[in-house]
Amino acid sequence: MKTEKLTTAQALVRFLKNQYVRRDGKEVQFIKGVWGIFGHGNVAGIGQALQEYPELPYYLARNEQAMTHSAVAYSKSKNRMEAFACTASVGPGSTNMITGAATATINRIPLLLLPSDIFARRNVGPVLQQLEYPLSQDVSVNDAFRPVSRYWDRINRPDQLPWAMLEAMRVLTSPDETGAVTLCMPQDVQTESHDFDTSLFRKRVWTIPRQRADEALFADAVRLIKEAKRPFAIAGGGVQYSEATEELKHFAQKTGIPFGETQAGKGSLPFNHPQNMGSVGATGSSAANETACEADLVILFGTRLSDFTTSSKSQFQNPDVKFVHINVCSMDAHKLSALPLQADAKVTLQELNVSLAGDHISDEYGKTVERRRNEWMKEMERVTSLPSKEKLQQPNVLRAVNEAAGKESVVICAAGSLPADLHKLWKTFEPGGYHLEYGYSCMGYEIAGGIGVKLAKPDKEVVVMVGDGSYLMLSSELITAVQEGIKITVVLLNNHGFGSIGALSESVGSKGFGTNYRFREKKSGQLEGDTLPMDFVMNAKSYGVGVQQASSYDELNVALQKAFKAEETQVVVVNVDKTQRVPGYSSWWDVPVAEVSSLDSVNQARKEYEKARKDQRNHF
C-alpha cells in the first residue's frame, strides 16, 4: 500500500477534485469548486489546502447563507449532476449555513457542507464562539445540522475521513437520497497529518442509475391509464432532473393527456404545447385546476406533492380519483395512497410511450381540454394587460420582463408574491428556463441563486425577480457578481413591505398588520406611520453595478432594453402597486384562522376557513 502524508484538509480537497459522475454514458466532474468564508476555524486547514490545490476553484461570498444558495442554484441548473462544497469558520459562520442545508434537503439538491468545529482534542476550551453543553463534550452548534442533512458526520480523527467522504459521495449522488451532506471539521483535525492511502485519490466515477419500475406495478399503471376517462398528469422537478422532457412531450402529444406543472416542474413542457394547462395547485391556472378537480386518474411524474401542489389536499375532488406516481423516492411515490412506481421518470416514460401506443383521450375530453386552455390564454392576456392609472402593477411588469428577456432566458425567484404570479403567468419555453426555489421558499435566495445559475449557464440571459423584502436580506451578493465578472439582471419590485404576507394577513382578517415598511406612529405605538425612505437606486449603485429605474411602462421597457444589452450586472428598480393581485383559480391553501377574536374581520375569515376545510380529502 502506497501512502502520502497529508493534512486532513489536504486529503479532503485531493479527494473531492477527483470525484466524477456518469449517466447515459456522459461523464462530468462532480464537485466543481468550494465556496467559503475563512475564519479561525478553517483558514489554516481547508483554506490552506485550497491554496495548495488550486485545481479545485475557490469562490468568496459575502454571506455564508448566500454561498449555499449559489451552490444549490448551480446544482439545480445542472440537473443535480454537478455540485459545490461550502466551508465556513467555527460558530456563527458555520451555523449561517443551516438555512442552506434545509434548502438543499427539502428541494432534494446535492450540497456538501464543511462547517468548522470545536477542538477534537478537548484540552482547548471553551473556544471562542463555542457552545458549552453540560451533558456532553461531543456536542457543538453543528449538531443543529443533523435534522436538515441527509448525511451528517464529525471527523474527530484524520483516519476517519476516507470512510466519511465515501459515504458522503454515495448520498450526494443518489437520486432518491440526495440533499445536504454535512461533514463537521474540528479545527485541530483539519491541520493534523496522516499517512493516507494514495488509492483514495484516484479518479472515482459514480454511476447515476436509471431505476426501472416493478413489472407488475407498471402493468397496473398502464391498465389504470387506459381505463381512465378524464386523466390528468402533473410534471414535477423529477422530470427535469432525469432529463425526461422530450419523452414527456411525446407522451402528452400521443395520448392527449393534459398536464399541469409544479414550481419545480414548470418548463417540462413548452408554454405553447397544446397539452400544457399551466401551473397547478394553490398557485395554479384555471385550466389546470379545473381539470385536476374532476380528474378520475392523476398521473404524477417526479413531484414531492407539496402542500401547494395539492391545494392542501383539496384539489382533487372526483370521489373515485386514483393516483399513479412515478418517483425515485419511495416516500414520495407512496403519497396520496398512489400506485407507487419507484423509478426514473425518463425510462418509465419511454416504456409508457411503448405500452400506450395508439391510446388517446376521447374527443369529448379533448375538446374540454382545448376549451379550458384557450380560456386560460385569454385570462392571462386580461390579467397582464390591465391599465395602470398611477403605479406599475406586478402582473404587467412580469409580462414586460418576460417579453424583453426572450424565450431562451432563465428567470430566478424564491419568495413573496412573485412566485405565485410567476407560476401562473411566466411563459417558459425551455427546460431549466424557470428556476424557482419553492420547496423552502427562502427569502434571500434570489440574487445568490442568480449567480449560481449564471455560473452553470454562462450563455443564458439570467433574470432575477425579487421583492424589496427579500432584496434587503441578501443584496450583498451583488458585489460577488461583480467580483466574478458575471452578468445577471436583477428586477427589484418595490412595494414597501411584504406583499405576499400582507395579502395573507388580509385573508385571515388581520388587515395586513406588521407587513408594511413604515415608521412607528407615536400616537398609536404601531408601525403605521409614513413609508420608510429606502433609496434602492443609491443602494444598488453602491455595489458598483449598473442601475436603471422605471416609474411608467415606457420607462420600464427602455430600462429593460438597456439592462439586457449591458455586459455587467444590472439592477432595475420598479415601484409597483401593492394592492394589484392575480386571482386564485379553483384552489385553496390551508392557513388556519384564529378561532375566536374581537375583530369582526377575523371572525368572518374563520367562517370562510371552516367552510373551505370541508373540501379537504385524506385520499386513504
Image (cartoon, rainbow, N blue to C red):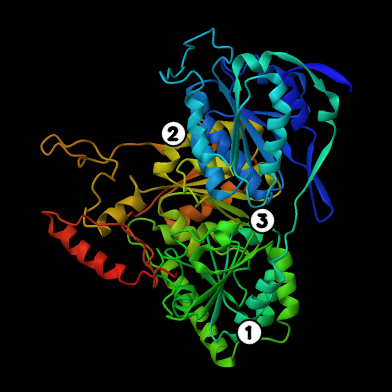
Q: Which residue is mark 3?
A: 241
Residue 80 in the figure: left or right of residue 489: right
Residue nearest the observer in this picture, 597 or 205: 205
Residue 290 in view of the camera: yes
Q: Earlier in the sequence, mark 1 or mark 2?
A: 1
Q: Which mark is residue 332?
A: none
The residue lying at 28 percent from left, 45 percent from top is: 516
- Element class at badge 2: helix
Q: Which residue is mark 1?
A: 226
- Note whether 186 is above or below 65 in the view shown: above
- Kindly indicate the quadrant of the structure image that contains residue 544: top right
Residue 244 position in % (x across, y down): 70, 64
Q: CA distance from mark 1 to mark 3?
A: 27 Å
The residue to which callout 2 is attached is 538
For marks 1 and 2, give the CA distance. Answer: 61 Å
Amino acid on which disc 1 is placed: Lys
Q: Earlier in the sequence, mark 1 or mark 3?
A: 1
Residue at the spot 55% in from the left edge and 49% down from the top edge: 107
What is the three-letter code of the residue carrying label 2?
Answer: Met
**Residue at point 51% right, 63% down?**
335
Q: Amino acid at mark 3?
A: Tyr
For mark 1, give the secondary structure. helix
